[in-house]
Amino acid sequence: MDPQLAAWLVSPEAEPALVAAGAEADPDSLAAAQRLRRSFPPDQAAAALTQAALRRKAVAKFGERAGRLFFTAAGLEQATRAEVAAWRASRFVAAGATRVVDLGCGLGADALAFADARLDVVAVDADPVTAVFASTNLGRPVVCAKAEDVAEQLLTEADAVFLDPARRTSAGRTWRLGDLSPSWEFATGLLDGRLGCIKAAPGLPSTAIPQWAGATWVSHRGDLVETSVWSWGSRVAVLLPDGLELASGPPPVLGELGRHLWEPDSAVIRAGAVGRLAELLDARSIQPGIAYLTGDAALTSGFATGFEILEVLAFDERTLRAWVREHGIGILEIKVRGLDVDPAVLRRRLKPSGAGSATVVLTPTPAGARALVVRRL
């Protein structure tokens, strides 16, 4: 899409096309395109239908607000979920920020949250189409420029900075640190001497986080969604929307299998907080380097999924197939850590059939590899 078409799309003149596209049962269908082209030029019809489809997809991130916002496919993919953006804004407020420069604002997800939190926000994005959409979404002008070109000037009148470096290349989405725009070195440099946060990918290598920086590994409704690097604070796992936090710490002690098993949330694992979780659960490690915890107390925690261990079987395909057959298991969930096993392939080979259901955890233990038949607490 070019900036001229984007400008039309956010104008009052496009409202009839957007309404018509939004009324289509399937905006991606050929029939929908044919209907809209009777009243609008092909490029405008296509733009309106694309917007209708993206708005429906965006409900998962933005709720009912999605129907009033404008999106690009790439921008929606990288946009922060609304509850995560609200949490970040509240953290800036608690730290005393008043004016935030959002460098690389994308479609404005975080800038919206800053504004909702009554922070003054200056939004910047290098892409002209994205800037048009972000400006409309925010109801205020967006600076269309590269972050590197305007950061120094804009930050002279602000006390905080937020960056979400672009994680896309011409080949598509990228997880390579060297592909970020602006660069990781530029981003971390802006945190020096001011309140600031960089949103990064969930798998950001811990070695890339400056030793002086704080970091949060954020899980939202069970999904590990980002690593945030901060100019203040410690290193913690954050679980949203409840706002639970667990700090990193030493690894848990090793011990024998108990009556229960816990699978820590991915944010807890990435934050190095499994040892702290073990203390809360009176649990121990099942094997060095394996994130499962075990213990005898039937405790629950928002930081982990708990299971009761019903049976301990040898990790042997024939043994497992016989157990599945004897118990009439038709629905079989297989969870694996630390073993070279493809759960989907193994499930087919075990040939589940019947009315029963079961969850089996395959893991190394102090006594060797085992298959644990478990029930969720």
Image: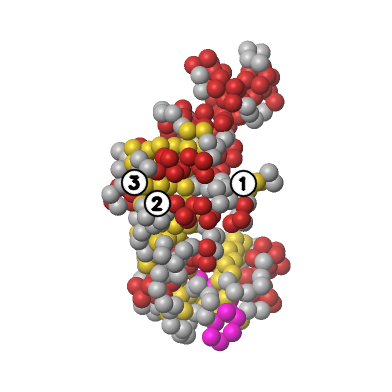
Quadrant in which the N terminus is drawn? top right
Depth check: 75 or 358 in front? Answer: 75
Viewer can see residue 110 = no
- Amino acid type, callout 1: Arg
* First-in-chain label (3 vs 1): 3
* x 66%, y 16%: residue: 41
- Neighbourhood count class around disc 2 (C-alpha, 10 Å): few under 14, some 14–19, many 20 upward: many
Q: Residues within 10 Å of mark 1 (few under 14, many from 20)?
A: some
Separation of marks 2 and 3 at Cα, in angstroms: 9 Å
What residue is pinned by disc 1? 168
Q: Earlier in the sequence, mark 2 or mark 3?
A: 3
Q: Amino acid at mark 2?
A: Gly
- Span shown in magenta: 364-377
Residue 286, horizontal then vertical, whole percent = 49, 79
Q: Where's the C terminus, which quadrant?
A: bottom left
Q: Which residue is mark 2?
A: 196
Residue 288 is tagged as none
Amino acid type assigned to the residue bearing label 3 in the image? Asp
Residue at 37% over, 47% down: 160
Corner quadrant of residue 296: bottom left
Give the distance between the C-alpha atoms of the residues marked 2 and 1, in whole angstroms. Answer: 22 Å
Colouring style = secondary structure
Q: Which residue is denoted by mark 3 in the rendering?
A: 159
Q: Nearer the viewer, residue 240 or 209?
A: 209
Residue 367 lies, with reference to residue 358, above or below; the image says: below
